[in-house]
Amino acid sequence: MTAPLLQLRQITKSFGGAPALRGVDFDLQAGEVHALLGENGAGKSTLIKIVTGAHQPDGGTLALAGREIRALAPATAHQLGIACIYQQPALFPDLTVAENIALRLESGPGLRRINWPARHARAAHLLTRIGAQISPAQEVRTLSMPGQQLVEIACALGAGARIVIMDEPTAALTQEEQQRLYAIVHDLRRSGIGVIYISHRLEEIFALADRVTVLRDGASVGTHPVAALNETELIRMMVGRELAPIAAPSAAPPGAVVLSVRGLGCTASGVRDVTFDLRAGEILALAGLVGAGRTELARILFGLTPADSGSITLHGEQVALRSPAAAVAQGIAYVPEDRRRHGIILELPVAHNITLALHRRIFPGTWLRLAAERALALGFIRDLAVKCSSPDTAGGNLSGGNQQKVALARWLATQPRVLMLDEPTQGVDVGAKVEIHRIIRQLARDGLAVLLLSSDLPEVLAMADRIGVMRGGTLAAILPGAAEARTVMAAALGRTEQGAA
Amino acid sequence: MNRYFREFSVAGALAVLLVALAIFAPGFYQPQPLLSLATREAPTLVVAGGMALVIICRQIDISVGSLFSVCSVGAGLLAARHWPLALVLPAAVGLGATLGAVNGLLVAGLRLPSIVVTLAMMVTLRQGLNLVRQGRFVDLPEGLQWFGLSQPAGQWLLVLAALALLTALAWGMRHLAVGRFVYAIGSDAEAARLAGLRPRWGTFLVFVLLGALTGLAALMNVVQSPQVQPLSGSGLELKVIAAVVVGGVAISGGRGNLWGAFAGLLLLACIAPALTHLRVEAYWEKAIQGAIILLAVVADGIRSRRPAR
């Protein structure tokens, strides 16, 4: 048997002390489609970035066609025939298809004379090879998403790629476009190229892949021929054993309905027909895969992308949330994802960050009372155990977990009726995570209605009183908080359970 | 202390200059010329206060010079028709605020880049003024100069008014919620929006405020002479932006304060008389001002790169 195209052995990688990969083995044969499967955060992207040279592994070996490669850089990976097609194609929209392809493939001094006919001929040849009906003279901005993906694939072929990585290529495609892409994947395989295929859609894996490797918590659960597995087994591999609950769910029965959403939708952000009730003292977790529409739903409820259908009722009163200012006035608080950019303002002191959303309430119409502001800030710093030298410390000087607490404090200070938390523990260390979970639980016990958006399944299972599962822009299911991990995963993937209840 | 390091370093540079003058050219410290210098710079200080707000809000307005000229001529024409000062003053401020609102509407409403919008405004106003007035001066009625007061009294009035305005603005930036909002919007408009603020509204308002202050400054300049020059505001935008930047207001928004801009303006304004008294050729003035601006920008560049973020 010839050496595999790509062989990874015992790859390890950590980011700031948190292990992302813990000794992963993976191999890819020529003429094979090898699917890579795993929950959000299982380590798929990290593994791909190691293969494309974007990240260097901390340990383990990487061999291409039997030859061990050390210190793989992106440019080297490109030369060695590794190409990656991302979900969002990275092309230059104002240049033509031929120019985009040439940018990737042509080399030479900056002042060389361009042979335009040859450039167009090569682009046309590559596009024909994958059966794409695209003119090389077309500007990329005029192409649809799948059209742009085809240009990316043409680039990969033109570069003589032996290994093609596809990262959720069908996520944005229609049924028909998917079928065309499958045909191209089959063609690639027939011509001896190895394809690493990442997807959340189980049916795709069964239709396309020869083998599948499942990652979980940064480790490989196993590599199996697809023919030897069924869907239930795959889901079980992805989820694994139940994790012990982090915090006990609340014992108290939830109170009155605070927020009631009926048939909510927004065409622009792809959310449609969402219906649920949220009660005082309840934590409703929203689970789902990346891109399922959780953040988009929160943005509607916060007035960032106002709804164009359905209704929102707060305490029995129908409200229109056309702007964040309106949502704040109605007592809705939203601690956004990506707090380093949006959760707090890095240049403002901690105290100013905490009072930023409630000026109208505590300083109505007049000047700021700096002493009162400081006292308020000190109170939150103590209650939430924010580690900072003083309320005057700039927000940017705090650690991730403490920034998150400041973002949380800002919204708690507004005394909201509904608190939405988007990935509250993403990127914070374990200690801060436990503390944030404790704070959220305490808030719910005090009667706040909490909507918790999280990709972290153990977090959802541990914290939620009920679990809403989003899929394809809508709320696909509402499960009890005691649901099993695989039930949630099955709902997120769009599979009905098969005797797994 | 560290937080205001930049402001203190400008004030320190100014102090060094003043001490050097006291030692090497004590002739600089004569009450009458100093009062005249302060009076000349009083309108500039008022515009600089507004400009600091616009720059803290991560925008810029290069049309203030043309706006200043238009408001000067407008105020002069009204005064020449024997409007009382009590009407000319609100008219000048209102004209400035209206033109500032046009800038603000284009920048905040249509989300156009402020440098292009205000460049267009600058050229349009300047050429429009040339076309309408053909470079003619406006002769002012007798009683308008120095508000009809004696010259020293008028000068003190202007200087104190400018300082009072600056103090009010500086107080507002620290003690009013809207001041805080300007910093928040300039630091990160999207984060400010997610905090429930209205960044576009805030951006619009700082442009209106700068326009109004420019109108007021124009009037403060008009009352200093018996005639209105049609080009009285040319070059004002550069002077004002330089003062604000030298004073430690970050051109990238969100950082700086008005007292820094005040120190920056004083530093730049003292260069020319200092050179005269130190018997250095006046040609060096622009070169030295340029070097100070460059130094300030380099210092900001180094400072903003240092903190780990």
Image: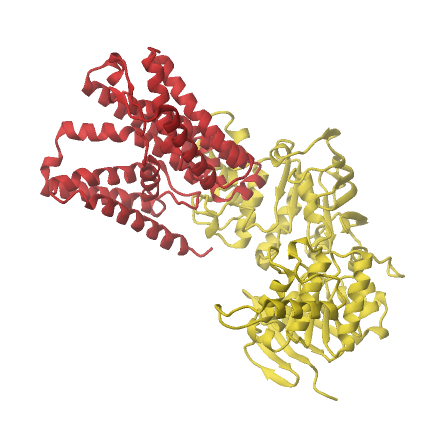
Chain colours: A yellow, B red
Residue found 52% across the figure and 69% down from its top: A113
Q: Residue furthest bottom?
A: A1
On the picture, is A49 further left or further right than B301?
Answer: right
Q: Name the spot of residue B91 as percent of width and height, x first.
A: 40, 18
Q: Residue furthest front?
A: A117
Q: Is residue A104 above or below residue B107?
A: below
Residue A176, above or below A317? below
Left or right of residue B5: residue B309: right
Compared to residue B272, the image places residue A492 above or below, namely below
Can you give x and y, in whole percent of width and height, for residue A365 in the image?
Answer: 50, 25
Q: Position of residue A498 (x, y in %)?
A: 89, 61
Q: Nearer the viewer, residue A475 or A198?
A: A198
- Please say whether residue A445 is visible from this viewpoint: no
Q: Residue at x 74, y 29 (%)?
A: A318
Q: Decide: is A318 above or below A29.
A: above
Q: Quadrant of the N terminus of chain A?
A: bottom right
Task: Give the percent coordinates (x, y) of residue B293.
Answer: 30, 47
Q: Quadrant of the C terminus of chain A?
A: bottom right
Question: Foreground: A458 or A31?
Answer: A31
Say which quarter of the image contains residue A177.
bottom right
How many marks the image carries: the answer is 0
The residue shown at (54%, 54%) is A400
Q: Residue at x 76, y 39 (%)?
A: A264
Between B76 and A231, the one lying in front of the other is: B76
Q: Quadrant of residue A4?
A: bottom right
Q: Is residue B20 left or right of residue B87?
A: left
Q: Which residue is outermost to the right?
A: A499
> Which is more toward the observer, A201 or A316?
A201
Whether residue B60 can be seen here: yes
